[in-house]
Image (cartoon, coloured by chain):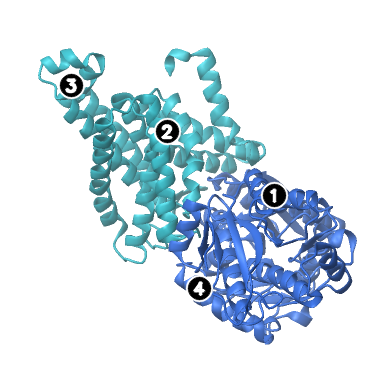
């Protein structure tokens, strides 16, 4: 195996891992701060992806403008979903069932509007690759990875250094005491849900740029993204990015060195090892 | 007409939703037929990972029943298609065929799409001695039931005959094709044919540069593309289900590599033809809306109606090809046998089909070989000028088109 093959494969893994992180970022926030295992996050991602396809493909809008439109729209959707779940006092376990049901509804809705057939956003936006010695850096993947890194860092800083971040953590430790100090727990949970929704929107927009879409693909992302969330420690924005990279690169090296069919084993082997030998990490 | 939980069917997106939600069934408007309907039961993957192709078969079945009911239907009676959604799950297909026979009490069965689901339906049909006509079953050796009849005539050993036919076409150009790479999904029927191609290519003197298998549903083709680039074969054979062929081509483009020659079994045909990366891509076909198929008036009418329905349903690619042709031929086989024998009896239908075969839009289909398989009618097609053209064998090639090998 040549250095070029290994290096190009690692680059590919970094891009995949960045996408896992981008898709998992909103999920990890809602799991930790809302106590909601929001499987509908994947439905939001695909709804955003199809909307991006529609607006940037047949609609002819620039993809960056579409991202700017989709993110606030999905902020509202995330906000509304959380209001709904809070209204019915849905707990952590029930949230899995309910949000899975929402995902099925979303899949049916997508199939109704866009058919079950594959759709592909054909765009000249950032097509092609930059060359760096023997390596190729695809422009769209580079933009996505930069966005994923930036969003993870900004989210981590937001949670660590802002009053809202501190209030969220205080509310998580003891909501009653936090409330007595003026922390508006309910408003903050709606805000986090909105942010998670907006992140799903951004993730979906990049999904449309990078992948061909089909409604049933929603479920194919569950395992690897949840693995990144768990490996990165639930609630950690930088952790999900690091875990995403770890998974992506380990998959890519597996594909380069052995049979590609073994690649799906990599993230789950890592997850099992962490759960067995370092359970407090998760 | 609607009965029980059946729905009147039109090939529209709204209908697909109704199917998904209600697991309903369908009938079509009745024409010059009279009397109680002949109920034909079957499932399709209207939801789940196979839904894109299931939607094609749904349109085809609706069109066939609609047109047949304008004529004599079956035995002069209207055809009622009792259609259920198997959600792309073989286990569910088995349960639903059981239901169709024991609860819905259908007169006849028509198969689902895809090898695993057909195999499930076949086991139920066998238990009740029912004839099962089906389409696109990819591993003939597994079809041991003597009352199954494939509407997709690929011969009993496609791993051998199809691969040899394809290589005959490639080598007929006289170009130097000495090395090959096989990259294949582990989707069973796809892998089965890829392994066959690998053996045939080796036996005929080509050198293998690379053989890779990946899981169905793989997302990242970057490392696979890097390995293909390094192998740099004269011909890249890809066992691809759906969009996997396009995904690999896109990954190859990102590392600035274009395969010299490339072949895909079984790609999503529209997306591959429409992509600029699909230039000169080879694939297999059993039916295209091209001569000699389109010389048949029924095929020409079917193609026109299919395009209209597919456009209305919002499909990105509206040309009928292998899946649509195999679906339509399945209906022709079943209906033709019923009308020729004037019987719904499974013993009578079985005897008739084994003896006479069937005339279909894809040609004469025979069932007199091993396990009811007859001739291998697969052809080689190629993307030329953004459209598919049949390029091999020569006698069925699209007029003016020849295979392009570099």
B128 displayed left or right of B259? right
Which class describes the residues within 10 Å of circle 1: few (<14), some (14-19), or many (20+)?
Answer: many
Please tell me if label 4 and label 1 are on a single chain: yes
Q: Colour of chain B?
A: blue
Q: Quadrant of residue A33?
A: top left
Q: Which label is found at residue A97?
A: 2
Q: Residue at x 84, y 65 (%)?
A: B350
| Residue A194, horizontal then vertical, whole percent | 24, 38
Does A31 appear above or below B96?
above
- In primary-sequence order, the first of circles 4 and 1 is 1
Which quarter of the figure has residue A62? bottom left
Q: Secondary structure at mark 1?
A: helix
Q: CA distance from mark 2 to mark 3?
A: 29 Å
Find the distance from the CA under tag 4 to the CA under tag 1. 27 Å
Residue for badge 1: B116
Q: Which residue is mark 3?
A: A167
Q: Position of residue B23 (x, y in %)?
A: 53, 53
Front residue of A210 and B105: B105
Say whether marks 1 and 2 touch (CB < 8 Å).
Answer: no
Q: Is residue B194 visible?
A: yes
Mark 4, residue position: B309
Is there one chain holding both mark 2 and mark 3? yes
Residue A209 visible (yes or no): no
Residue A178 is tagged as none
At mark 2, the secondary structure is helix
Give the chain ID for the cyan colour: A
């Amino acid at each position: 195996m040549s250095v070029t093959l290994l290096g190009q494969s690692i680059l590919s893994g970094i891009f995949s891992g960045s996408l896992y992180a981008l898709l998992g970022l909103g999920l990890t926030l809602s799991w930790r701060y809302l106590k909601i295992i929001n499987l509908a996050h994947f439905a939001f991602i695909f709804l955003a992806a199809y909307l991006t396809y529609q607006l940037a493909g047949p609609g002819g809008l620039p993809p960056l403008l579409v991202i700017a439109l989709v993110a606030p729209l999905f902020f509202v959707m995330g906000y509304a979903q959380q209001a709904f779940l809070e209204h019915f006092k849905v707990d952590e376990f029930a949230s899995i069932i309910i949000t899975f049901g929402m995902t099925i509804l979303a899949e049916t809705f997508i199939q109704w509007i866009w058919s079950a057939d594959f759709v592909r956003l054909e765009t000249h936006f950032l097509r092609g690759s930059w060359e760096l010695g023997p390596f190729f850096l695809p422009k769209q993947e580079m933009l996505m990875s930069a966005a994923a890194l930036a969003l993870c860092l900004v989210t981590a800083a937001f949670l660590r250094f802002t009053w809202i971040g501190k209030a969220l953590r205080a509310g998580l430790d003891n909501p009653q005491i936090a409330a007595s100090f003026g922390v508006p727990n309910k408003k903050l949970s709606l805000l986090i849900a909105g942010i998670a929704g907006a992140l799903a929107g951004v993730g979906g927009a990049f999904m449309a740029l990078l992948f061909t879409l089909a409604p049933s693909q929603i479920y194919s992302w569950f395992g690897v993204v949840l693995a990144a969330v768990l490996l990165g420690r639930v609630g950690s924005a930088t952790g999900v990015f690091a875990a995403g990279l770890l998974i992506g690169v380990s998959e890519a090296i597996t594909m380069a060195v052995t049979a590609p069919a073994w690649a799906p084993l990599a993230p789950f082997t890592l997850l099992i090892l962490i759960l067995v030998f370092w359970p407090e990490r998760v | 007409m609607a009965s029980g939980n059946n729905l009147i069917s039109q090939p529209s997106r709204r209908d697909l939703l109704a199917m998904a939600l209600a697991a309903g069934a369908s009938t079509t408007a009745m024409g010059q037929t009279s009397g109680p309907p002949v109920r034909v039961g079957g499932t399709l993957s209207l939801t789940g990972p196979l839904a894109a192709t299931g939607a094609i078969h749904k349109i085809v079945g609706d069109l066939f029943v609609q047109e047949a009911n304008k004529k004599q239907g079956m035995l002069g009676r209207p055809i009622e298609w009792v259609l259920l959604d198997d959600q792309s799950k073989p286990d569910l297909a088995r349960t639903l065929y059981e239901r169709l026979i024991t609860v819905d009490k259908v007169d006849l069965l028509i198969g689902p799409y895809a090898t695993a689901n057909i195999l499930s339906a076949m086991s139920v049909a066998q238990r009740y001695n029912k004839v099962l006509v089906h389409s696109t079953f990819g591993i003939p050796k597994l079809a041991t039931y003597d009352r199954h009849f494939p509407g997709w005539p690929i011969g009993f050993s496609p791993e051998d005959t199809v691969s040899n036919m394809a290589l005959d076409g490639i080598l007929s150009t006289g170009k130097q094709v000495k090395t090959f790479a096989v990259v294949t999904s582990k989707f069973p029927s796809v892998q089965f044919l890829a392994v066959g191609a690998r053996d045939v290519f080796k036996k005929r003197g080509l050198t293998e540069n690379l053989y890779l298998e990946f899981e169905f549903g793989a997302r990242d083709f970057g490392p696979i593309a890097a390995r293909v680039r390094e192998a740099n074969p004269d011909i890249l054979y890809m066992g691809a289900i759906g969009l996997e062929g396009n995904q690999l081509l896109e990954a190859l483009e990102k590392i600035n590599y274009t395969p010299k020659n490339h072949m895909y079994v079984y790609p999503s045909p529209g997306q591959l033809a429409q992509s600029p990366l699909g230039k000169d891509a080879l694939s297999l076909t059993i039916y295209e809306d091209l001569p000699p198929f389109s010389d048949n008036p029924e095929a020409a009418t079917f193609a026109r109606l299919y395009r209209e329905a597919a456009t209305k349903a919002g499909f990105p690619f509206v040309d009928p090809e292998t899946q649509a042709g195999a679906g339509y031929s399945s209906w022709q086989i079943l209906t033709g046998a019923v009308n020729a024998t004037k019987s719904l009896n499974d013993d009578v239908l079985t005897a008739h089909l084994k003896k006479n075969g069937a005339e279909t839009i894809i040609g004469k289909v025979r069932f007199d070989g091993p396990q009811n398989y007859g001739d291998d009618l697969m052809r080689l097609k190629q993307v030329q000028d953004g459209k598919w053209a049949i390029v091999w064998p020569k006698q069925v090639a699209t007029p003016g088109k020849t295979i392009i090998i570099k």
